[in-house]
Image (cartoon, coloured by chain):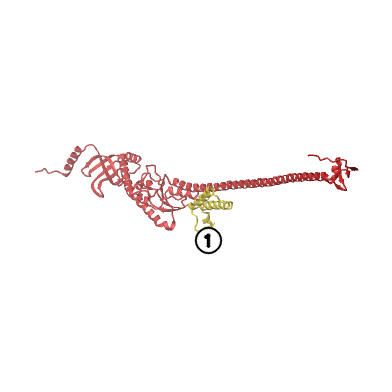
Amino acid sequence: MNKSPKLTYEEAMEELNTILKELETGEPKVEEMGNMAKRASELLKYCREKLRGIEEEVENNLSENE
Amino acid sequence: MQEKIKLSTFLAQLREALLNKFPGIYYVIGEIGDLKINQNGHCYIELVEKDDSRIIARCRANVWASSVNTIFPEFEKNTGEELKEGMKILCHVQVQFHEVYGLSLNIVQIDPGFTLGERARKKKEVLEKLKQERILEMNKSLPFPLVPTKIAVISSEKAAGYQDFKVQLDSNSYGYKIETELFKAVLQGNNASHSIIEALKEIFYALDEKQFDVVAILRGGGSQLDLDCFDSYELSRAVARFPRPVITGIGHDRDQTITDIVAHTELKTPTAVADHILQLYMGFEEEMYRLTSRTGKVISRLLSVREMELNNSVLKFKHLSERVAQSNYNGLEHFKSKLQGLLSKHLAKSQSQLDLLSERIKSADPAYILNRGYTLTSYNGILLRNVADVSKGEEIVSTGKDFVINSTITSIKNRKK
């Protein structure tokens, strides 16, 4: 995930809730739904990694190798 | 003239008078100005009374070793506090007067109830003050982060409490990485309040750089008797006004301290604080997972609904087009038979007209008339139409089907129609 500035936990959860709301009350097109599923999955993965400091580790390793 | 008297005698008289006037046990309220226990186990206290910070009364007091062993533990058990300087106490005293050592009070009992009452009173005062300043709810009203990422910890490094806390967080079984930074402070004794406030200041100045989102004040183990500092006005005010949520885990069995009351979240021990933080991480992860899962289910359901709708539409279209084709075919057939019908009728009509005509033609044919037995009468080769054209005695010819008769007119008669 390359997002700058980095998403906070609150923002990630809010986005996920927005997607869900759009699905349940809006009328998304079939193509949109595919994107939504993908984005939801991305958000979950991002948060899980962030909780475990994984992104940081990766970044640290990269900067060490420079 | 007054009698001359030796000092010892005078003091002995004084002593007797004093003890006669104050023979029993008296309940005296005083503040511990100084407290020492010597190697024999006897306790020497300086009792004072202050008006603000000015001493307006002072007296030496003592507790004999034997009493120390009963009074002190009893007091600590009942109040949860240790006897120390600055503490106001209600003591049961006996007057002592010694010619050499002078006046002193022998303390035979110290009333825990009074101290508890005093403490409650002081706490109430502090709470009132904080309430008036409208800061009682200030820290509590700060938004607590969904997931606290950087925690500033105020604790004594050596204390087991902090070590346990750190181990719990660093080696949690979920793999969560939780950043903490220790700001050392003394958490018991007379200097505790000031020390913790200094730590809070340090954290405050580091907020921009380090981005702490939560502060935890941890005190583990240690004496249960030294929690006064957490009731102090200065410390609780500092915590109430701190711009980040404060969690306390100061490990006490006693009633809530004021710092606990003003802090955003109060927990029992450093371990409980670590648990709480881990719970937040877990809860967040579970919620994210649940939302994502639900998103997938909703999409799945919506897609199958769409698919069903699509299939229905296709089916409907198929039926409709079949019906149209069918009705077109039927229409055509209908038209065809109608047309045929019309044609037949028309033909029949024409046929009958033709027949009629044919009949007419046939009946106009002389042969047809002759066949029926009629004869054609002619004279001089011309058909006889007018009877005036002939007269009696003339020759007429009658032509029949297959004969010709020559005749002579014998008579003519007119026939009336």
Q: Percent position (x, y) of residue B329?
A: 70, 46
Q: Which residue is mark 1?
A: A63
Front position in the image: B76 or B311: B311
Q: Is residue B295 left or right of residue B107?
A: right
Q: Percent position (x, y) of residue B354?
A: 79, 46
Q: Percent position (x, y) of residue B173?
A: 52, 47
Is label 1 in a helix, a strand or a loop? helix
- In the image, the chain rendered in yellow is A
Front position in the image: B284 or B344: B344
- Residue ID at (33%, 46%): B127
Placement of the N terminus of chain A among the 4 image quadrants: bottom right
Using the image, determine if residue B66 lies above or below residue A57: above
Placement of the C terminus of chain A among the 4 image quadrants: bottom right
Subunit of mark 1?
A
Q: Colour of chain B?
A: red
- Residue ID at (25%, 47%): B50
Q: Residue furthest left?
A: B1
Front position in the image: B82 or A1: A1
Q: Residue furthest front?
A: B392
Front position in the image: B141 or B307: B307
Mark 1 is on which residue type? Ser
